């Protein structure tokens, strides 16, 4: 728990109503969307502006109190779970759109703004903010920047980092630093903006962001390609790109996912096929028409049994909305849903899909696979039950093999979910010891007291989740055991 001195200092900065260390409030912020992981913070603080954030950080740094900056807690890697206690910082007061600059095509926002509100504000001016994480209706822009979130439109438009051109950041010592700006070009010094994007709150606290906007596309079309062969669907993805067509959306759903999504959304998805590709293209009418015709031809050549183009905007929106419900639909199957995001070069998707299916059979698990096939980002998802300890062991071993296979295929352990706690044991597989050493050197230089979201990214002592009845989740390791409270 916080000492009385630290508590009083924090209250003097943010006021009594913006400080809470009651058990009920701490419990609310003791977990995020990561299944089966929970740990209590010592207090929850809600600053009203950047100056207050800076003063809070100074107090915490002086007293070596851990800090966990938190958005809506929708991340899936344990990134906002306060595994080492300390102070959770909320941004409910810092949730304003500061400026929408139509001349420079930028929007400046505070970290607590909801991602969908950013997109809607841009759309109201005929502009477009493309990043669309699956949780965009509730996720905050601060969280999206910390995790470098992707989404369905990532293939054509990129991910969050491609639209962050300036930041205001409170550093671990309390200094306030501004990076970038409303600029098309800026190579003055190290690219600190990109360093902060995706750093998962381990290097500083983002208090304002300047985001790039682009003109709204004139039109778009959506289609479904149906397959009785998983490999044919996967090969179609590579063939579409090889034909120099870059769709906005190129999504993959296997049959178990299709069935669950259709049961949930009731929009008429075909449940008798092995796989579906959901494809969307936007742009000028002539380009969209030409690309859709080429895509239809490619899909049929690669074995699609049927290709259906949405006949109306309402039908197109329903298809996209159904895809976005995949996780919610799968979560209805069992009490615990483990969703991951192994990512491979798109040319290796067929091999990766086959590997996931073989691994599921090996460990006698149901693993449903969907995801952003166009950029190789697959989401193998396992409905399970944390109370079944033996099955959870098999789930852990299965996903370890999935990550290993992804890396072997030239891929990575995470395409958009982040490392956090859950992927930390596997990070060295991707970066090697040398890469880890570079990252640790940066962390140590900026945060020598290790107060910024400690226990994340580099937490090699966390090896696997072992659920112990009545005790919560134990992260077993060679050198220690870290206990967290059961959900």
Image (cartoon, grey):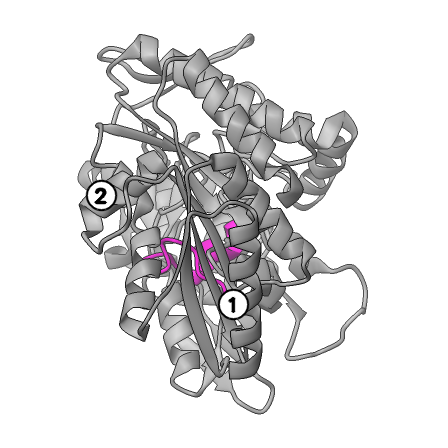
Q: Quadrant of the N terminus?
A: top left
Is 123 included in the stretch rendered in magenta? Answer: no
The x and y percentages for residue 62 are 54, 43
Location of residue 294 by image quarter? bottom right
Helix, strand, or loop for circle 1? helix
Point 52% across, 75% down: residue = 289
When the figure is inspected, residue 270 is found, relative to residue 145, above or below; the finding is above
Point 28% across, 37% down: residue = 330
The x and y percentages for residue 397 are 47, 15
Label 1 or label 2, whichever comes before in sequence order? 2
Tell me: 109 left or right of 263. right
Q: How dense is the environment of label 1, judged by Cα within 10 Å: few (below 14), some, or many (20 and up)? A: many
Q: How many marks?
A: 2
Q: Which residue is mark 2?
A: 25
User: Could you tell me if residue 464 is visible in this image?
Assistant: no
Helix, strand, or loop for circle 2? helix
Magenta region's main secondary structure?
Answer: loop
The magenta region covers 130-148
Query: Whole-Å distance between the Cαs marked 1 and 2?
Result: 51 Å
When the figure is inspected, residue 196 is found, relative to residue 123, above or below; the finding is above
Tell me: 304 left or right of 34. right
The x and y percentages for residue 290 are 57, 74
Tell me: 218 left or right of 466. right
């Amino acid at each position: 728990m916080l000492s009385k001195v630290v508590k009083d200092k924090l209250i003097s900065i943010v006021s009594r109503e913006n400080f809470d260390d009651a058990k009920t409030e701490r419990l609310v912020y003791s977990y995020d969307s990561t299944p089966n992981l929970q740990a209590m913070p010592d207090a929850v603080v809600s600053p009203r502006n950047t100056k207050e954030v800076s003063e809070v950080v100074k107090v915490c740094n002086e007293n070596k109190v851990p800090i966990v900056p938190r958005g809506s807690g929708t991340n899936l890697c344990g990134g906002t779970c306060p595994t080492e206690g300390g102070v959770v910082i909320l941004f409910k007061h810092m949730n304003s759109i500061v400026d929408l600059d139509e001349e420079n095509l930028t929007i400046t926002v505070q970290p607590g703004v909801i991602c969908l509100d950013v997109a809607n504000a841009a759309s109201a001016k005929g502009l477009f903010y493309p990043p669309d994480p699956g949780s965009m209706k509730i996720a905050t822009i601060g969280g999206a920047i910390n995790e470098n979130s992707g989404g369905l439109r990532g293939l054509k438009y990129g991910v969050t980092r491609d639209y962050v051109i300036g930041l205001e950041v409170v550093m671990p010592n309390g200094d306030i630093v501004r990076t970038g700006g409303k600029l098309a070009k800026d190579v003055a010094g190290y690219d600190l903006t990109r360093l902060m994007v995706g750093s998962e709150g381990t290097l500083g606290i983002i208090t304002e962001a300047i985001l790039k906007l682009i003109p709204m596309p004139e039109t778009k079309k959506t289609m479904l390609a149906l397959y009785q062969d998983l490999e044919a669907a996967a090969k179609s993805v590579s063939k579409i790109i090889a034909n120099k067509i870059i769709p906005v959306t190129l999504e993959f759903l296997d049959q178990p996912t299709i069935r669950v999504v259709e049961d949930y959304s009731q929009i008429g998805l075909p449940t008798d096929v092995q796989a579906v590709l959901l494809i969307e293209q936007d742009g000028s009418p002539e380009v969209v028409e030409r690309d859709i015709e080429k895509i239809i031809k490619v899909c049929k050549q690669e074995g699609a049994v049927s290709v259906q183009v949405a006949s109306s905007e309402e039908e197109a929106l329903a298809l996209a909305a159904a895809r976005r419900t995949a996780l919610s639909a799968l979560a209805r199957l069992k009490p615990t849903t483990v969703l991951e995001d192994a990512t491979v070069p798109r040319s290796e998707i067929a091999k990766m899909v086959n590997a996931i299916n073989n691994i599921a059979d090996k460990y006698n698990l149901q693993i449903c696979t969907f995801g952003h096939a166009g950029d190789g980002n697959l989401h193998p998802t396992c409905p399970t039950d944390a109370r079944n300890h033996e099955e959870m062991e098999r789930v852990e071993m299965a996903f370890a093999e999935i990550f290993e296979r992804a890396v072997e295929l030239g891929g990575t352990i995470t395409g958009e979910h982040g490392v956090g706690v859950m992927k930390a044991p596997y990070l060295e597989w991707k970066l090697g010891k040398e890469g880890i050493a570079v990252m640790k050197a940066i962390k140590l230089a900026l945060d020598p007291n290790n107060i910024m979201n400690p226990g994340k990214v580099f937490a090699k002592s966390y090896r696997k989740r072992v659920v112990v009845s009545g005790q919560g989740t134990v992260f077993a390791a060679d050198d220690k055991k870290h206990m967290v409270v059961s959900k």
